[in-house]
Amino acid sequence: NPQHVRLEFDGKQHFAVDLDSENGLTVNNKPQYGARVPVSPGSILHIGQTEIRIYTPDYPVTDTIRLQKVNPIFPWLSRSINVWASFFLALGVMLGWAYLQVWTEEVGLVLTAAAGSAVGTIILWAALWSVAGRLAKHKAHFKSHAAFMSVYLIFGVITWYVETYVDFLTNENWIAYVTTYGINFILLAFLLYGSFTLSTLMTQHRKLVLSLCFSFGVGLGVFILSLVSVKTFNQQPLYPGTLEPYLAQ
């Protein structure tokens, strides 16, 4: 018999009627043979190997989840050309910084170490967040994470030069400290917010709060470690604090 079950409604109650089928009817895991069984919204019927759930127009459902607007920077960074451009730009910036800042005769060794450090940092960061994204959203976004870390490294080098010139042009160490920690706080918070957006289903408010708190915690930890490691006597003079800067007056 190709007809297995019939659903009926008497104006108040819904019923599932088994039409003397070969395998019978199961309602909420209870076998029914040739029976007329009342069913309610949410009841589960098994017809052979087919599962049917009963719903009515007044069945309660969860509230609609408002979709978050995607920041234009995320689709832009996910493009392959932008991913590779940011990666090679970050690599070039790191190599240039190492070449200009490290004074040694082993230039090749220094540049190799700088390149390996930059590439390793980008790949490790992207891999870890890709695993988190695969578990939380079933999407890795490896290339986007790599692009975010590349941009972070680029601005990190720019920030280093900004900090250096601020330290040189002022005769107050606290100005350099505020500039250093302030810029790095913003950069790290931006990187974390982007990673949370790509890898989690958190709300925008929660991502922002976690990014700011984590960035603040890292900055506070670095500041405490720098205070602990300060020595009473330093054989290497602190030139920015010793030389008269250009804007000392």
Image (spheres, helix red, strand yellow):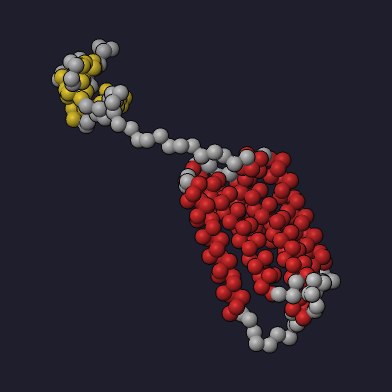
Q: Quadrant of residue 227?
A: bottom right
Task: Count all numbered tags in the image, as a single digit.
Answer: 0
Q: Quadrant of residue 92?
A: bottom right
Residue located at (71% from left, 75% from top): 172
Q: Nearer the viewer, residue 21 or 9?
A: 9
Give coordinates of residue 18: x percent, y percent.
Answer: 20, 18
Judge left or right: residue 42 versus residue 104.
left
Residue located at (59% from left, 41% from top): 71
Visible residue check, residue 23? yes
Location of residue 90 with respect to 13 vertically, above or below: below
Location of residue 33 with respect to 205 vertically, above or below: above
Q: Nearer the viewer, residue 171 or 42?
A: 171
Give coordinates of residue 215: x percent, y percent.
Answer: 56, 61
Residue located at (76% from left, 63% from top): 161
Location of residue 236 with respect to 70 vertically, above or below: below
Give coordinates of residue 83: x percent, y percent.
Answer: 69, 45
